[in-house]
Image (cartoon, rainbow, N blue to C red):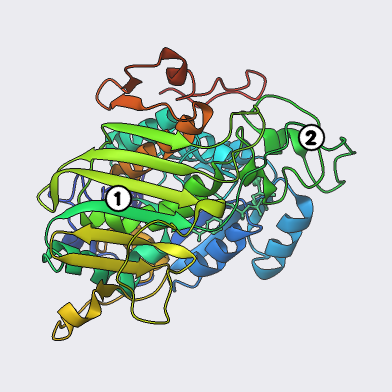
Amino acid sequence: MSTRAIRRREFLTTSATALGALSLAPRTARALSANQVLRTAHIGVGGMGRADLRDVASHPQVEVAALCDVDAGRLATALQDYPQAESFADYRELLDQLGDKIDAVVVSTPDHTHAPAALRAMKAGKPVYCQKPLTHEVSEARRMREVAEEKGLVTQMGVQIHSAAPYRRAVKMIQSGAVGKVSEVHAWSNKNWGMDSSELPPVAPVPETLDWDLWLGVAQERSFVPGIYHPAQWRRMIDFGTGTLGDMGVHIFDTPYCALELTAPNWVKTTCRPPTGLGHPTKNLVEYEFPGTKFTTDTLTWKWYDGQYAPPADLEVPLPPESQLPGQGSLFIGQEGMLLLPHVAEAVLLPQENFADYQPPEAGGANHYHQWVDACLGNGESSMPFSLAGPLTEALLLGVVANRFPDTKLVWDAEAMKVTNLEEANALLSREYRQEFGGVPTT
Ligand SMILES: NC(=O)c1ccc[n+]([C@@H]2O[C@H](COP(=O)([O-])OP(=O)(O)OC[C@H]3O[C@@H](n4cnc5c(N)ncnc54)[C@H](O)[C@@H]3O)[C@@H](O)[C@H]2O)c1
Protein backbone atom coordinates (compact mmCIF):
# COMPACT_ATOMS: atom_id res chain seq x y z
CA MET A 1 0.00 0.00 0.00
CA SER A 2 1.40 3.45 -0.91
CA THR A 3 2.15 6.05 1.76
CA ARG A 4 -0.65 8.17 0.37
CA ALA A 5 -3.07 5.26 0.60
CA ILE A 6 -2.00 4.52 4.17
CA ARG A 7 -2.40 8.15 5.12
CA ARG A 8 -5.85 8.34 3.54
CA ARG A 9 -6.89 5.22 5.41
CA GLU A 10 -5.59 6.56 8.72
CA PHE A 11 -7.41 9.84 8.33
CA LEU A 12 -10.62 8.13 7.42
CA THR A 13 -10.50 5.89 10.44
CA THR A 14 -9.89 8.60 12.98
CA SER A 15 -12.91 8.57 15.27
CA ALA A 16 -14.72 11.84 15.81
CA THR A 17 -15.12 11.49 19.53
CA ALA A 18 -13.63 8.36 21.00
CA LEU A 19 -10.22 8.85 19.45
CA GLY A 20 -10.31 12.61 19.11
CA ALA A 21 -7.28 13.04 21.33
CA LEU A 22 -4.95 10.77 19.36
CA SER A 23 -2.21 12.10 17.16
CA LEU A 24 -4.39 11.96 14.05
CA ALA A 25 -6.23 15.05 15.17
CA PRO A 26 -8.05 17.29 12.69
CA ARG A 27 -5.19 19.76 12.57
CA THR A 28 -2.78 17.12 11.26
CA ALA A 29 -5.38 15.95 8.79
CA ARG A 30 -5.47 19.39 7.20
CA ALA A 31 -2.18 18.41 5.58
CA LEU A 32 -4.28 16.47 3.05
CA SER A 33 -3.77 17.78 -0.41
CA ALA A 34 -6.41 20.21 -1.61
CA ASN A 35 -7.63 17.82 -4.27
CA GLN A 36 -8.22 14.94 -1.85
CA VAL A 37 -11.61 13.41 -2.56
CA LEU A 38 -13.90 11.13 -0.60
CA ARG A 39 -15.27 8.37 -2.82
CA THR A 40 -18.72 7.54 -1.51
CA ALA A 41 -20.99 4.52 -1.94
CA HIS A 42 -24.73 4.99 -1.36
CA ILE A 43 -26.95 2.09 -0.29
CA GLY A 44 -30.63 2.97 -0.89
CA VAL A 45 -30.92 5.86 -3.35
CA GLY A 46 -34.69 6.40 -3.57
CA GLY A 47 -36.82 8.33 -1.06
CA MET A 48 -34.60 9.87 1.62
CA GLY A 49 -31.61 8.18 0.01
CA ARG A 50 -31.98 10.51 -2.94
CA ALA A 51 -31.80 13.55 -0.66
CA ASP A 52 -28.83 12.00 1.19
CA LEU A 53 -27.08 11.39 -2.11
CA ARG A 54 -27.64 14.93 -3.32
CA ASP A 55 -26.57 16.49 -0.02
CA VAL A 56 -23.43 14.40 0.45
CA ALA A 57 -22.49 14.92 -3.21
CA SER A 58 -22.88 18.69 -2.88
CA HIS A 59 -19.62 18.68 -0.90
CA PRO A 60 -16.90 19.78 -3.36
CA GLN A 61 -14.55 16.99 -2.26
CA VAL A 62 -17.01 14.13 -2.77
CA GLU A 63 -16.94 11.83 -5.74
CA VAL A 64 -19.95 9.50 -5.93
CA ALA A 65 -18.33 6.16 -6.73
CA ALA A 66 -21.15 3.66 -6.30
CA LEU A 67 -24.92 3.47 -6.06
CA CYS A 68 -26.97 0.54 -4.80
CA ASP A 69 -30.71 -0.02 -4.74
CA VAL A 70 -32.92 -3.09 -4.82
CA ASP A 71 -35.43 -1.19 -6.96
CA ALA A 72 -34.01 -0.95 -10.48
CA GLY A 73 -36.27 2.02 -11.26
CA ARG A 74 -34.95 4.05 -8.35
CA LEU A 75 -31.40 3.02 -9.14
CA ALA A 76 -31.79 4.12 -12.76
CA THR A 77 -33.12 7.53 -11.70
CA ALA A 78 -30.15 8.12 -9.39
CA LEU A 79 -27.72 6.95 -12.06
CA GLN A 80 -28.97 9.66 -14.39
CA ASP A 81 -27.39 12.22 -12.05
CA TYR A 82 -24.20 10.22 -11.38
CA PRO A 83 -23.57 8.24 -14.58
CA GLN A 84 -19.93 7.62 -13.65
CA ALA A 85 -20.92 5.64 -10.54
CA GLU A 86 -20.80 1.84 -10.48
CA SER A 87 -24.23 0.36 -9.78
CA PHE A 88 -25.42 -2.60 -7.73
CA ALA A 89 -28.64 -4.18 -6.47
CA ASP A 90 -26.92 -6.02 -3.61
CA TYR A 91 -24.87 -4.08 -1.06
CA ARG A 92 -22.88 -7.20 -0.20
CA GLU A 93 -21.58 -7.34 -3.77
CA LEU A 94 -20.86 -3.62 -3.74
CA LEU A 95 -18.74 -3.89 -0.59
CA ASP A 96 -17.03 -7.10 -1.65
CA GLN A 97 -16.25 -6.01 -5.19
CA LEU A 98 -15.30 -2.37 -4.73
CA GLY A 99 -13.10 -2.75 -1.64
CA ASP A 100 -10.50 0.02 -1.70
CA LYS A 101 -12.23 1.83 -4.56
CA ILE A 102 -14.61 3.40 -2.06
CA ASP A 103 -13.77 5.41 1.05
CA ALA A 104 -17.07 5.85 2.88
CA VAL A 105 -20.63 4.52 2.84
CA VAL A 106 -24.06 6.11 3.21
CA VAL A 107 -26.92 3.83 4.32
CA SER A 108 -30.43 5.12 3.53
CA THR A 109 -32.44 1.90 3.39
CA PRO A 110 -35.50 0.94 5.45
CA ASP A 111 -34.68 0.55 9.16
CA HIS A 112 -34.27 -3.26 9.22
CA THR A 113 -31.35 -3.05 6.78
CA HIS A 114 -29.44 -0.25 8.54
CA ALA A 115 -27.38 -2.48 10.82
CA PRO A 116 -26.70 -5.36 8.41
CA ALA A 117 -25.44 -2.96 5.72
CA ALA A 118 -23.66 -0.51 8.02
CA LEU A 119 -21.96 -3.21 10.08
CA ARG A 120 -20.70 -4.88 6.92
CA ALA A 121 -19.34 -1.54 5.72
CA MET A 122 -17.72 -0.76 9.05
CA LYS A 123 -16.20 -4.25 9.27
CA ALA A 124 -14.60 -3.38 5.93
CA GLY A 125 -13.15 -0.26 7.57
CA LYS A 126 -15.49 2.29 5.97
CA PRO A 127 -16.77 5.38 7.76
CA VAL A 128 -20.58 5.38 7.67
CA TYR A 129 -23.40 7.91 7.49
CA CYS A 130 -26.53 5.96 8.50
CA GLN A 131 -30.10 7.14 8.47
CA LYS A 132 -32.14 7.28 11.65
CA PRO A 133 -33.14 5.45 13.74
CA LEU A 134 -29.65 3.99 13.83
CA THR A 135 -31.05 0.43 13.85
CA HIS A 136 -34.20 -1.64 14.06
CA GLU A 137 -33.08 -3.69 17.07
CA VAL A 138 -31.76 -2.56 20.44
CA SER A 139 -28.88 -5.05 20.25
CA GLU A 140 -27.89 -3.78 16.80
CA ALA A 141 -27.60 -0.22 18.14
CA ARG A 142 -25.19 -1.47 20.80
CA ARG A 143 -23.19 -3.39 18.18
CA MET A 144 -23.01 -0.43 15.80
CA ARG A 145 -21.56 1.71 18.56
CA GLU A 146 -19.05 -0.96 19.55
CA VAL A 147 -17.84 -1.64 16.01
CA ALA A 148 -17.50 2.07 15.19
CA GLU A 149 -15.41 2.45 18.31
CA GLU A 150 -13.33 -0.71 17.79
CA LYS A 151 -12.50 0.39 14.26
CA GLY A 152 -12.11 4.07 15.15
CA LEU A 153 -14.42 5.15 12.34
CA VAL A 154 -16.00 8.51 11.62
CA THR A 155 -19.75 7.98 11.82
CA GLN A 156 -22.89 10.08 11.73
CA MET A 157 -26.57 9.27 12.19
CA GLY A 158 -28.89 11.06 9.77
CA VAL A 159 -30.65 13.48 12.06
CA GLN A 160 -29.73 16.53 10.00
CA ILE A 161 -31.64 19.00 12.19
CA HIS A 162 -29.30 18.08 15.05
CA SER A 163 -26.93 20.53 13.36
CA ALA A 164 -29.58 23.23 12.74
CA ALA A 165 -29.33 26.55 14.59
CA PRO A 166 -32.71 26.41 16.44
CA TYR A 167 -31.87 23.04 17.97
CA ARG A 168 -28.33 24.05 18.84
CA ARG A 169 -29.66 27.21 20.46
CA ALA A 170 -32.23 25.24 22.48
CA VAL A 171 -29.42 23.01 23.81
CA LYS A 172 -27.50 26.10 24.93
CA MET A 173 -30.60 27.57 26.56
CA ILE A 174 -31.26 24.43 28.57
CA GLN A 175 -27.62 23.91 29.52
CA SER A 176 -27.21 27.53 30.63
CA GLY A 177 -30.13 27.03 33.01
CA ALA A 178 -32.74 29.23 31.27
CA VAL A 179 -35.58 27.24 32.87
CA GLY A 180 -33.62 25.80 35.80
CA LYS A 181 -33.25 22.09 36.39
CA VAL A 182 -35.60 20.09 34.21
CA SER A 183 -37.94 17.55 35.82
CA GLU A 184 -40.11 16.53 32.88
CA VAL A 185 -39.93 16.43 29.11
CA HIS A 186 -43.03 15.93 27.00
CA ALA A 187 -42.49 15.22 23.31
CA TRP A 188 -44.97 14.40 20.58
CA SER A 189 -45.73 13.87 16.92
CA ASN A 190 -49.19 13.72 15.43
CA LYS A 191 -47.87 11.49 12.65
CA ASN A 192 -49.32 8.06 12.57
CA TRP A 193 -46.85 5.43 11.39
CA GLY A 194 -48.78 2.38 12.58
CA MET A 195 -51.21 -0.22 11.30
CA ASP A 196 -53.91 -1.53 13.63
CA SER A 197 -55.45 -4.17 11.39
CA SER A 198 -54.63 -7.75 12.32
CA GLU A 199 -54.86 -8.86 8.70
CA LEU A 200 -52.86 -8.00 5.63
CA PRO A 201 -54.42 -7.14 2.27
CA PRO A 202 -54.03 -9.83 -0.44
CA VAL A 203 -50.60 -10.61 -1.80
CA ALA A 204 -49.74 -9.56 -5.35
CA PRO A 205 -46.90 -10.14 -7.79
CA VAL A 206 -43.69 -8.35 -6.91
CA PRO A 207 -43.22 -5.24 -9.10
CA GLU A 208 -40.89 -5.99 -12.00
CA THR A 209 -38.29 -3.48 -10.91
CA LEU A 210 -38.05 -4.73 -7.31
CA ASP A 211 -35.75 -7.48 -6.01
CA TRP A 212 -38.00 -8.56 -3.14
CA ASP A 213 -35.54 -11.07 -1.68
CA LEU A 214 -32.85 -8.39 -1.41
CA TRP A 215 -35.39 -5.92 0.01
CA LEU A 216 -36.23 -8.43 2.76
CA GLY A 217 -32.54 -8.87 3.44
CA VAL A 218 -31.98 -10.41 6.87
CA ALA A 219 -35.73 -10.47 7.64
CA GLN A 220 -37.71 -13.71 7.35
CA GLU A 221 -39.24 -14.51 3.98
CA ARG A 222 -42.84 -13.54 3.16
CA SER A 223 -44.96 -12.59 0.15
CA PHE A 224 -45.09 -9.11 -1.30
CA VAL A 225 -48.20 -7.07 -0.42
CA PRO A 226 -48.73 -3.78 -2.24
CA GLY A 227 -49.03 -0.69 -0.06
CA ILE A 228 -47.62 -2.44 3.02
CA TYR A 229 -43.86 -2.57 2.59
CA HIS A 230 -42.05 -0.91 -0.32
CA PRO A 231 -41.78 2.02 -0.62
CA ALA A 232 -41.98 3.89 2.71
CA GLN A 233 -44.96 2.03 4.25
CA TRP A 234 -42.65 -0.53 5.95
CA ARG A 235 -42.42 2.06 8.81
CA ARG A 236 -45.76 0.84 10.09
CA MET A 237 -44.69 -2.81 10.32
CA ILE A 238 -42.98 -4.33 13.36
CA ASP A 239 -40.50 -6.41 11.35
CA PHE A 240 -39.21 -3.51 9.26
CA GLY A 241 -39.94 -0.14 10.84
CA THR A 242 -40.17 1.37 14.28
CA GLY A 243 -43.49 3.24 14.21
CA THR A 244 -43.81 6.95 14.86
CA LEU A 245 -41.53 6.83 17.89
CA GLY A 246 -38.67 5.40 15.84
CA ASP A 247 -39.42 7.64 12.89
CA MET A 248 -40.12 11.11 14.30
CA GLY A 249 -39.13 10.39 17.90
CA VAL A 250 -35.45 10.24 16.97
CA HIS A 251 -35.58 13.81 15.68
CA ILE A 252 -37.73 15.14 18.49
CA PHE A 253 -36.06 13.17 21.28
CA ASP A 254 -32.62 14.20 20.04
CA THR A 255 -32.54 17.70 21.56
CA PRO A 256 -33.82 16.76 25.04
CA TYR A 257 -31.53 13.71 25.08
CA CYS A 258 -28.44 15.70 24.15
CA ALA A 259 -29.28 18.91 26.04
CA LEU A 260 -29.92 17.05 29.29
CA GLU A 261 -27.06 14.60 28.69
CA LEU A 262 -29.35 11.65 29.33
CA THR A 263 -28.02 8.11 29.42
CA ALA A 264 -30.04 4.89 29.57
CA PRO A 265 -33.57 4.89 30.99
CA ASN A 266 -34.41 3.22 34.33
CA TRP A 267 -37.68 1.96 32.89
CA VAL A 268 -40.10 2.46 30.04
CA LYS A 269 -43.84 1.83 29.69
CA THR A 270 -46.05 2.13 26.60
CA THR A 271 -49.80 2.59 26.64
CA CYS A 272 -51.33 1.39 23.37
CA ARG A 273 -53.61 -1.27 21.91
CA PRO A 274 -52.71 -4.97 22.32
CA PRO A 275 -50.14 -6.31 19.84
CA THR A 276 -51.27 -7.92 16.57
CA GLY A 277 -47.91 -9.32 15.48
CA LEU A 278 -48.06 -7.18 12.32
CA GLY A 279 -48.08 -3.41 12.64
CA HIS A 280 -47.07 -0.89 15.26
CA PRO A 281 -49.98 0.73 17.15
CA THR A 282 -51.22 3.94 15.54
CA LYS A 283 -51.36 5.78 18.85
CA ASN A 284 -48.90 5.44 21.67
CA LEU A 285 -48.17 7.08 24.98
CA VAL A 286 -44.65 6.14 26.06
CA GLU A 287 -43.31 6.99 29.50
CA TYR A 288 -39.67 6.84 30.51
CA GLU A 289 -37.77 7.51 33.69
CA PHE A 290 -34.12 8.51 33.30
CA PRO A 291 -31.49 8.86 36.01
CA GLY A 292 -30.84 12.49 36.89
CA THR A 293 -28.00 14.51 35.37
CA LYS A 294 -26.52 17.91 36.21
CA PHE A 295 -29.28 19.51 34.10
CA THR A 296 -32.22 17.64 35.67
CA THR A 297 -33.87 16.97 38.99
CA ASP A 298 -33.04 13.65 40.74
CA THR A 299 -34.80 11.72 38.03
CA LEU A 300 -36.31 12.87 34.75
CA THR A 301 -39.73 11.85 33.50
CA TRP A 302 -40.05 11.81 29.74
CA LYS A 303 -43.36 11.24 27.97
CA TRP A 304 -43.90 10.63 24.26
CA TYR A 305 -47.30 11.00 22.60
CA ASP A 306 -48.09 10.06 19.00
CA GLY A 307 -51.02 9.64 16.63
CA GLN A 308 -54.22 10.83 18.28
CA TYR A 309 -52.47 11.24 21.63
CA ALA A 310 -50.59 14.20 20.13
CA PRO A 311 -50.26 16.98 20.97
CA PRO A 312 -50.81 16.19 24.67
CA ALA A 313 -54.26 17.39 25.71
CA ASP A 314 -53.97 17.43 29.49
CA LEU A 315 -50.78 19.46 29.90
CA GLU A 316 -51.17 22.86 31.48
CA VAL A 317 -48.95 25.05 29.33
CA PRO A 318 -48.98 28.86 29.77
CA LEU A 319 -49.14 29.52 26.03
CA PRO A 320 -49.61 33.06 24.71
CA PRO A 321 -53.27 33.90 23.96
CA GLU A 322 -54.62 32.53 20.67
CA SER A 323 -51.80 30.01 20.34
CA GLN A 324 -51.75 26.24 20.67
CA LEU A 325 -49.21 23.45 20.90
CA PRO A 326 -47.63 22.57 17.54
CA GLY A 327 -48.39 19.21 15.92
CA GLN A 328 -44.85 18.04 16.65
CA GLY A 329 -42.36 19.23 19.24
CA SER A 330 -41.18 18.99 22.80
CA LEU A 331 -41.73 20.79 26.07
CA PHE A 332 -39.12 20.97 28.82
CA ILE A 333 -40.58 21.64 32.26
CA GLY A 334 -37.97 23.25 34.48
CA GLN A 335 -38.03 24.53 38.03
CA GLU A 336 -38.03 28.12 36.74
CA GLY A 337 -40.12 27.93 33.58
CA MET A 338 -40.79 25.94 30.45
CA LEU A 339 -39.10 25.71 27.07
CA LEU A 340 -41.29 24.82 24.11
CA LEU A 341 -39.40 23.56 21.07
CA PRO A 342 -41.64 23.20 18.03
CA HIS A 343 -40.32 20.83 15.36
CA VAL A 344 -38.40 22.55 13.63
CA ALA A 345 -38.49 26.15 14.84
CA GLU A 346 -37.00 28.43 17.45
CA ALA A 347 -37.58 27.64 21.12
CA VAL A 348 -40.03 29.72 23.15
CA LEU A 349 -39.65 30.30 26.89
CA LEU A 350 -42.87 30.22 28.90
CA PRO A 351 -44.64 31.99 30.48
CA GLN A 352 -43.44 34.61 28.01
CA GLU A 353 -43.90 37.52 30.45
CA ASN A 354 -41.29 35.99 32.79
CA PHE A 355 -38.69 36.00 30.01
CA ALA A 356 -39.35 39.41 28.45
CA ASP A 357 -35.69 40.49 28.91
CA TYR A 358 -34.16 37.13 27.99
CA GLN A 359 -31.48 37.25 25.28
CA PRO A 360 -31.20 33.88 23.50
CA PRO A 361 -27.63 32.65 23.04
CA GLU A 362 -25.88 32.79 19.67
CA ALA A 363 -25.90 29.49 17.81
CA GLY A 364 -24.88 28.87 14.23
CA GLY A 365 -26.09 26.01 12.09
CA ALA A 366 -23.93 23.53 10.20
CA ASN A 367 -24.41 21.20 7.27
CA HIS A 368 -24.80 17.79 8.91
CA TYR A 369 -23.72 15.93 5.76
CA HIS A 370 -20.68 18.07 5.03
CA GLN A 371 -19.66 17.84 8.66
CA TRP A 372 -19.40 14.05 8.23
CA VAL A 373 -17.53 14.34 4.91
CA ASP A 374 -15.13 16.85 6.44
CA ALA A 375 -14.59 14.59 9.46
CA CYS A 376 -13.87 11.66 7.11
CA LEU A 377 -11.22 13.82 5.46
CA GLY A 378 -9.74 14.58 8.87
CA ASN A 379 -11.25 18.02 9.27
CA GLY A 380 -13.34 18.52 12.41
CA GLU A 381 -15.76 16.09 14.03
CA SER A 382 -19.20 14.70 13.33
CA SER A 383 -21.82 15.77 15.86
CA MET A 384 -23.95 12.61 15.95
CA PRO A 385 -21.39 9.78 15.95
CA PHE A 386 -22.58 6.28 16.77
CA SER A 387 -21.11 6.70 20.27
CA LEU A 388 -24.02 9.12 20.86
CA ALA A 389 -26.54 7.84 18.29
CA GLY A 390 -26.25 4.28 19.69
CA PRO A 391 -27.42 5.04 23.25
CA LEU A 392 -30.06 7.49 21.97
CA THR A 393 -31.44 4.82 19.61
CA GLU A 394 -31.31 2.12 22.30
CA ALA A 395 -33.43 4.27 24.61
CA LEU A 396 -35.88 5.03 21.88
CA LEU A 397 -36.20 1.44 20.68
CA LEU A 398 -36.98 0.28 24.21
CA GLY A 399 -40.17 2.33 23.95
CA VAL A 400 -40.93 0.52 20.68
CA VAL A 401 -40.31 -2.88 22.31
CA ALA A 402 -42.67 -1.82 25.12
CA ASN A 403 -45.55 -1.45 22.64
CA ARG A 404 -45.61 -5.27 22.58
CA PHE A 405 -46.36 -5.32 26.32
CA PRO A 406 -48.91 -2.53 26.79
CA ASP A 407 -49.11 -0.88 30.21
CA THR A 408 -46.18 -2.90 31.53
CA LYS A 409 -43.17 -1.15 32.98
CA LEU A 410 -40.00 -2.63 31.49
CA VAL A 411 -37.15 -2.17 33.95
CA TRP A 412 -33.87 -1.73 32.08
CA ASP A 413 -30.33 -2.76 32.98
CA ALA A 414 -28.29 -1.07 30.27
CA GLU A 415 -24.98 -2.60 31.24
CA ALA A 416 -26.34 -6.14 31.10
CA MET A 417 -28.56 -5.08 28.17
CA LYS A 418 -31.52 -6.79 29.76
CA VAL A 419 -35.08 -6.11 30.79
CA THR A 420 -34.87 -7.35 34.36
CA ASN A 421 -38.55 -7.92 35.14
CA LEU A 422 -39.97 -9.49 31.96
CA GLU A 423 -37.96 -12.20 30.26
CA GLU A 424 -40.18 -12.24 27.11
CA ALA A 425 -39.18 -8.67 26.38
CA ASN A 426 -35.52 -9.69 26.05
CA ALA A 427 -36.40 -11.84 23.04
CA LEU A 428 -37.39 -8.64 21.22
CA LEU A 429 -34.06 -6.88 21.70
CA SER A 430 -32.53 -8.65 18.72
CA ARG A 431 -33.62 -10.61 15.66
CA GLU A 432 -32.45 -13.83 14.12
CA TYR A 433 -30.99 -12.99 10.72
CA ARG A 434 -32.24 -15.10 7.83
CA GLN A 435 -29.61 -17.77 7.30
CA GLU A 436 -29.92 -17.93 3.51
CA PHE A 437 -29.27 -14.22 3.23
CA GLY A 438 -26.14 -14.45 5.32
CA GLY A 439 -25.38 -12.44 8.38
CA VAL A 440 -22.85 -9.79 9.14
CA PRO A 441 -19.18 -10.82 9.20
CA THR A 442 -18.14 -11.30 12.79
CA THR A 443 -14.50 -10.33 12.45
N1 LIG B 1 -33.52 12.15 8.38
C1 LIG B 1 -34.69 12.36 7.83
O1 LIG B 1 -35.21 13.47 7.82
C2 LIG B 1 -35.39 11.22 7.16
C3 LIG B 1 -36.53 11.45 6.39
C4 LIG B 1 -37.13 10.36 5.75
C5 LIG B 1 -36.60 9.08 5.92
N2 LIG B 1 -35.51 8.91 6.71
C6 LIG B 1 -34.93 7.56 6.88
O2 LIG B 1 -34.43 7.13 5.63
C7 LIG B 1 -34.56 5.73 5.50
C8 LIG B 1 -35.32 5.42 4.22
O3 LIG B 1 -36.64 5.93 4.34
P1 LIG B 1 -37.50 6.25 3.03
O4 LIG B 1 -38.69 6.99 3.48
O5 LIG B 1 -36.63 6.88 2.02
O6 LIG B 1 -37.91 4.77 2.57
P2 LIG B 1 -38.25 4.29 1.09
O7 LIG B 1 -38.82 2.95 1.21
O8 LIG B 1 -39.05 5.34 0.39
O9 LIG B 1 -36.83 4.27 0.35
C9 LIG B 1 -35.86 3.34 0.69
C10 LIG B 1 -34.95 3.14 -0.50
O10 LIG B 1 -34.01 2.11 -0.17
C11 LIG B 1 -34.09 1.09 -1.18
N3 LIG B 1 -33.75 -0.16 -0.51
C12 LIG B 1 -34.53 -0.94 0.28
N4 LIG B 1 -33.83 -2.00 0.71
C13 LIG B 1 -32.59 -1.89 0.19
C14 LIG B 1 -31.41 -2.68 0.26
N5 LIG B 1 -31.38 -3.83 0.96
N6 LIG B 1 -30.33 -2.29 -0.44
C15 LIG B 1 -30.35 -1.16 -1.20
N7 LIG B 1 -31.45 -0.36 -1.29
C16 LIG B 1 -32.54 -0.74 -0.61
C17 LIG B 1 -35.50 1.16 -1.70
O11 LIG B 1 -35.64 0.57 -2.96
C18 LIG B 1 -35.71 2.66 -1.72
O12 LIG B 1 -35.16 3.23 -2.87
C19 LIG B 1 -35.26 5.27 6.76
O13 LIG B 1 -34.33 4.80 7.68
C20 LIG B 1 -35.94 6.50 7.29
O14 LIG B 1 -36.11 6.48 8.70
C21 LIG B 1 -34.90 9.95 7.30
Q: Amino acid at mark 2?
A: Leu
Lateral position of residue 84 relative to residue 284, left or right: right
Estimate the x, y position of residue 247 in percent, counting from the top left.
51, 50
Circle 2 SS class: loop
Q: Considering depth in this image, is 380 or 363 the residue closer to the camera?
A: 363
Q: Is mark 2 within 8 Å of ligand 1?
A: no
Does the rendering let one see residue 128?
no
Q: Which quarter shows the N terminus?
A: top left
Lateral position of residue 354 relative to residue 45, left or right: left
Sequence-first disc among 2 and 1: 1
**Residue at the spot of label 2:** 200
In percent of the image, x 57 and y 37: which residue is there? 112
Q: Residues within 10 Å of mark 1 (few under 14, many from 20)?
A: few
Does the rendering let one see residue 370?
yes
Q: Spatial distance from mark 2 to mark 1, Cα to Cα?
A: 57 Å
User: Which numbered disc, 2 or 1, marks the residue closer to the eye?
Assistant: 2
